[in-house]
Image: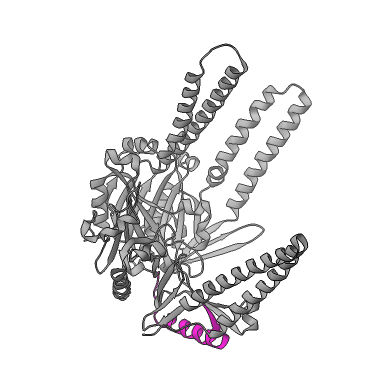
């Protein structure tokens, strides 16, 4: 079975945030470098920001690609992590509640995060970057499955 | 049964007050403290006016305390009617508590020191709430009444006739009190004060008497402060040990049809029942300093609601099966609770040889075993710990691997339960094996849930 991936919009959103913050940083560092040490200073500032932006871009891309989730008959599998791989399996019968959250950036790009909660505090099953309609559909589906297979503590 | 109904008419549906001595039991300690602190200050007081003021303040505090306790006793009523336990309480904020008997999970009897002196005990009702745990408290009843109420509530909770006597408990374990005292003193923390004393001794030896210069004075002061710190540490540790001994004195575990019966305490006694279904995990722990004596501890993890995370409440929850036991006793106890589970894991469950690179010290202890019902994992470096989890209680299964583990083609497997104290950890497993285990354990957990449901 193939893992389902977050929406490509999540990647666009991440890039947009990265680009914007890099631009702001660029302006500040170039200005500071220029004022302190003239043209050479500005050049160093720009180089630092560019190096930071490029490495972040690769890390973010790896992270984005690592996200995946799989709905199976009896459980939900979520995987994530670039450096530290994590895979979480949550049986539908163990789900206590599902919540959908969307931050300001998420809302601009019409994205949402679905989070599953079980009675165990350590369970960390989160699926970010879903289109809000998909997130709502997944939430309803999970809630329905959870109800059908619910069992006590 | 006329004797029974005359002892506890509340059980046959009449509103009743708690025992008339309850206010005294409730404020006993506080009142004692006030008197102990207050009275000597009168005698030591010089001016007569100051004495009167003190007398008035202490007297007013005592009277207010007594009055509050008496009022609280006056407005509290309880009864059992139909299939409900009803408690009405509160003067300003009226509170009506209703506990459906069917949902009662356990009935505990607790007797703090003052109550014990007066022959009273508190009955605490633990019921399964959907959102949050609500504890019903009947503080206090006389000892006989408490025992009667407990037996009858349990009988009713199990849908039996009211007069059904409490099922007898098969004794499983009784702590050796001498060993308990010894073991509570054998804690790693003692190394702190000992180290301080050693440093003090060395300092004193290196810089003895000598010419009375400033250096000598400094050393003496440093040694004195080191010693005083060490003494404080020893006192604190002694107090901690005393608390452990007081809480777990005469620790007894019994096996009854409805759960484990735990009795313990020196000054304050507790009788608790832990229903089997609430046990989320059992852990066998061998602290470093206990190992030469072959002692071990058996701990318990029960499902707790978020509210119970408060310190006081958490301490009230049963968390031990054996404060200290010989290894054989501990293994027998575990075998009794989890039939078929091996209490020592063989090397057949060990991770692959290359895991020694990732966990050189722990490697020797890492192991895993499972059957259709139980998962047993062993971890530890300094303190080997064996965690036993019933698969039907598994909430989620996690697989994790960092860069180093991945380079060795290893992964960590964790199984979470609703208990909050530990997770079962199978560390440094072969990647392929771990992937297989996730599938297999998931399937077994599903089957176990179906069977138990």
Residue B318, given in percent of the width and then of the height, sits at: 41, 53
Q: Judge left or right: residue B268 versus residue A36.
A: left
Image quadrant for the N terminus of chain A?
bottom left
Residue B274, position in %: x, y? Answer: 37, 57
Membership of B352 in magenta stretch? no
Q: Identify the coloring.
A: one colour
Residue range highlighted in magenta? A128-153
Nearer to me, A57 or A64: A57
In percent of width and height, residue B282 lies at 34, 57
Q: Closest to the observer: A46 or B12?
A: A46
Q: Nearer the viewer, residue B353 or B444?
A: B353
**Image point (30%, 55%), residue name:** B356
Residue B200 visible from this viewpoint: yes
A84 lies above or below B59:
below
Relative to the observer, which residue lies in front, B433 or B92?
B433
Question: Going 32% across and 46% down the picture, which residue do you hit?
Answer: B286
- Magenta-highlighted stretch: main secondary structure? helix
Name the side, left or right, on which B185 lies relative to B63: left
Residue that protrudes farthest toward the top in the picture: B211
Seen in the image, is B344 located left or right of residue B45? left
- Residue A115 in sight from this viewpoint: no
Displayed quadrant of residue B435: bottom left
Q: How many marks?
A: 0
- Say above or below: A107 vs B273: below
Whether the magenta-drawn stretch holds residue A145 is answered as yes
Q: Where residue B314 sits: x, y (%)?
A: 48, 54
In the picture, the quarter occupied by the C terminus of chain A is bottom left
Identify the residue shown where x is 54% and y is 58%.
Answer: B77
């Amino acid at each position: 079975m193939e893992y389902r991936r977050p929406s490509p919009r999540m990647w666009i959103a991440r890039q947009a945030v990265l680009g914007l913050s890099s631009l702001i940083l660029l302006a500040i560092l170039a200005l500071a470098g220029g004022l302190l040490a003239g043209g050479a200073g500005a050049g160093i500032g720009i180089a630092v920001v560019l190096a930071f932006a490029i490495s972040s871009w690769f890390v973010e891309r790896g992270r984005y690609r690592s996200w995946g989730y799989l709905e199976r008959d009896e459980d939900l599998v979520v995987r994530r992590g670039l450096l530290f791989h994590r895979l979480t399996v949550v049986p539908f019968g163990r789900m206590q509640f599902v919540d959908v959250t969307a931050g300001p950036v998420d809302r601009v790009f019409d994205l949402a995060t679905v989070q599953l909660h079980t009675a165990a505090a350590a369970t960390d099953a989160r699926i970010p970057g879903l289109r809000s309609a998909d997130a709502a559909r997944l939430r309803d589906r999970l809630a329905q499955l959870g109800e059908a297979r619910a069992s006590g503590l | 049964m006329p004797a029974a109904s005359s002892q506890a008419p509340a059980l046959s549906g009449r509103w009743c007050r708690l025992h008339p001595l309850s206010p005294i039991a409730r404020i006993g300690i506080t009142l004692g403290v006030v008197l102990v602190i207050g009275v000597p200050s009168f005698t030591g007081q010089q001016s007569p006016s100051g004495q009167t003021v003190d007398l008035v303040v202490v007297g007013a505090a005592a009277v207010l305390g007594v009055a509050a306790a008496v009022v609280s006793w006056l407005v509290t009523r309880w009864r059992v009617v139909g299939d409900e336990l009803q408690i009405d309480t509160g003067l300003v904020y009226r509170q009506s508590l209703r506990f459906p008997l069917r949902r009662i999970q356990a009935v505990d009897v607790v007797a703090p020191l003052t109550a014990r002196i007066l022959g009273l005990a508190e009955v605490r009702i633990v019921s399964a709430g959907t959102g949050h745990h609500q504890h019903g408290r009947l503080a206090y009843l006389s000892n006989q009444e408490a025992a009667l109420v407990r037996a009858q509530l349990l009988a009713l909770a199990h849908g039996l006739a009211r007069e059904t006597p409490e099922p007898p408990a098969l004794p499983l374990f009784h702590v050796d009190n001498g060993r308990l005292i010894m073991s509570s003193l054998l804690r790693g923390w003692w190394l702190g004060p000992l180290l301080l004393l050693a440093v003090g001794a060395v300092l004193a030896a290196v810089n003895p008497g000598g010419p009375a210069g400033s250096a000598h004075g400094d050393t003496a002061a440093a040694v004195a402060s080191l010693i005083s710190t060490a003494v404080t540490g020893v006192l604190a540790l002694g107090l901690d040990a005393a608390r452990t001994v007081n809480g777990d004195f005469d620790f007894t575990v019994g096996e009854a049809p409805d759960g484990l019966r735990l009795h313990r305490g020196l000054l304050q006694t507790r009788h608790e029942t832990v229903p089997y279904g609430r046990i989320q995990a059992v852990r066998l722990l061998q602290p470093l300093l206990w190992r030469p004596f072959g002692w071990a501890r058996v701990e318990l993890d029960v499902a707790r609601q978020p509210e119970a995370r408060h310190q006081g409440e958490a301490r009230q929850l049963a968390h031990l099966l054996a404060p200290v036991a010989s290894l054989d006793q501990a293994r027998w106890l575990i075998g009794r609770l989890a039939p078929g589970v091996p209490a020592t894991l063989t090397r057949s469950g060990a991770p692959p040889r290359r895991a020694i690179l990732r966990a050189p010290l722990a490697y020797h202890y890492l192991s895993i075993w499972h059957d259709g019902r139980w998962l047993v994992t062993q971890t530890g470096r300094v303190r080997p710990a064996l965690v036993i989890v019933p698969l039907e209680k598994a909430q989620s299964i996690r697989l994790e691997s960092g860069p180093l583990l991945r380079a060795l083609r290893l992964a960590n497997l964790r199984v979470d339960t609703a208990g909050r104290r530990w997770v079962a950890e199978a560390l440094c497993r072969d990647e392929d094996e771990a992937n297989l285990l996730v599938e297999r354990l998931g399937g077994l957990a599903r089957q176990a849930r179906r069977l138990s449901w």
